[in-house]
Amino acid sequence: MLSILVISVMCVSALNCISHDLPDYFPRCSIDDPNLNNCLLKAFNTVRPYVKKGVGEIGILPFEPLVLPTFNLSQESLAVNYTLTTWNFTIRGIDNYNVYEINYNPETLIFSAKIQFDALPVYTKYEVSGRLLHIPVEGKGFLSGTFLGPINATIRIEGKLMEVDGVEYYNTTNVKVTETIKDMEVAAEGLFDGDEELGRITNHLLNLFSAEIMQAANSVWEQLAEEMIMRFIKSFTGSVPYYKIFPKLNN
């Protein structure tokens, strides 16, 4: 699962947010800078140590670790058919990202970025029912695993400017994530009511066919990433006015 500048806080809408300025240590990129994309690329990597710890001034919670209190996933296809619920889904290493390409068009308000991550360890409480490929999965307990790197992701964000009390904010209207997670290692406790032999066999099969399972389930992980990124973007751009994020060189 990706991963890309994701947190679990959001403003309900830009209308409910309080106007803030960027912290002094955040780099500024001017909207009319002819080298805007180069500035943004540098900025995204410059702020990495700050977002790791969180940025309380603008409501960004720490990225390391990233904890999602609960979420539900379900998928029905020929290859996979399952329902999964997790609690305190914890991801390590999200802050260790490398943004290697950024494009922002101030005319269309469309932003895109390409990002790479190393391996991402995860652990969570879970409940699952269904099958992955030909492998039945049933049970609840504790799951640990690692999304193996390198993990590559592309994000595309569309939006429009919204005026609130005479101040313009960026209002995100759509997020699209494309990611490549080639493989995963997993160990699930509590399968089949704690049957040790069935659990051992199932874990062996899940790891043996992990690459095929990840490929079959990739779309639902992308959807989850899109929802989380939407929350982050609305929290950030809904609390900081557009022209404080992108001040003008020439007024």
Image (tube, rainbow, N blue to C red):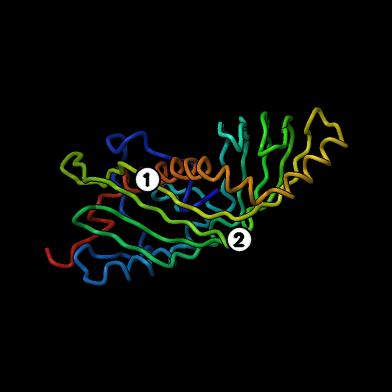
Q: Secondary structure at mark 2?
A: loop
Residue drawn 51% across the image and 59% down it:
152
Question: In the image as oriented, which residue stretches furthest toward the front?
Answer: 78
Residue 214 — which label?
none
Q: In this rendering, is residue 71 above or below 117?
A: above
Q: In this rendering, is residue 18 above or below 23?
A: above
Residue drawn 24% across the image and 59% down it:
105
User: Left or right of 3: which side holds 209?
Assistant: right
Mark 1: few, some, or many residues within 10 Å (few <14, many ≥20)? many
Q: Secondary structure at mark 1?
A: strand
Q: Tell me the quarter of the picture where residue 15 sits.
A: top left
Q: In this rendering, is residue 195 above or below 153?
A: above
Residue linked to disc 1 = 175
Residue 149 — which label?
2
Q: Nearer the viewer, residue 58 or 148?
A: 148
Residue drawn 61% across the image and 30% down it:
83
Mark 2: few, some, or many residues within 10 Å (few <14, many ≥20)? some
The amino acid on which the numbered mark 1 sits, given as a three-letter code, is Val
